[in-house]
Image (cartoon, rainbow, N blue to C red):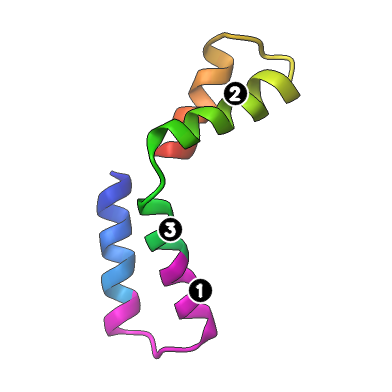
Amino acid sequence: MGLSVTLVLEQVIEQLAKQNWLTRLINLAIVNLAGVPSIVFGLFGIRVFVLTFPFGLSLLAAIPTLTVRH
């Protein structure tokens, strides 16, 4: 689902919106997020949801991490 939303957003930006700083910024964010490997999101999840919040190693830490990825 995340990939399909990314493709649609990229097509809409390219065809409907004129190229200004906001559309270039959105396009850059889409391209950068598509290139981030899953291990980076896993490390982000460990840092934020396990170490910062008191979730520990549980489903409460895994669910937001997977939500951020997809």
Q: Is residue 20 magenta?
A: yes
Q: Is residue 5 magenta?
A: no
How crowded pointer 2 is (Cα within 10 Å; few <14, some 14-19, many 20+) is rated as some
Q: Amino acid at mark 3?
A: Asn
Instruction: Give the dominant element type of the magenta stretch: helix, strand or loop.
Output: helix
Which image quarter: residue 6? bottom left
Magenta residues, as a range?
Answer: 13-28
Name the foreground residue: 18 vs 40: 40
Q: CA distance from mark 3 to mark 1?
A: 11 Å
Residue 50, position in %: x, y? 65, 19
* Residue behind mark 1: 25
Q: Is residue 58 left or right of residue 39?
A: right
Residue 17, position in %: x, y? 38, 85
Q: Residue at x 38, y 62 (%)?
A: 31
Name the foreground residue: 53 vs 12: 53
Closer to the chain start, of discs 1 and 2, is: 1
Q: Amino acid at mark 2?
A: Ile
Q: Residue at x 39, y 34 (%)?
A: 38
Dot 1 falls on a residue whose secondary structure is helix
Q: Which numbered circle lies on residue 46?
A: 2
Q: Is residue 22 left or right of residue 66?
A: right
Q: Above or below — where is 33 with respect to 29? A: above
Q: CA distance from mark 1 to mark 2?
A: 28 Å
Which image quarter: residue 13? bottom left
* Residue behind mark 3: 32
How crowded pointer 3 is (Cα within 10 Å; few <14, some 14-19, many 20+) is rated as few
Q: Amino acid at mark 1?
A: Leu
Q: Residue at x 53, y 79 (%)?
A: 22
Closer to the chain start, of discs 3 and 1, is: 1
Image quarter of the C terminus: top left
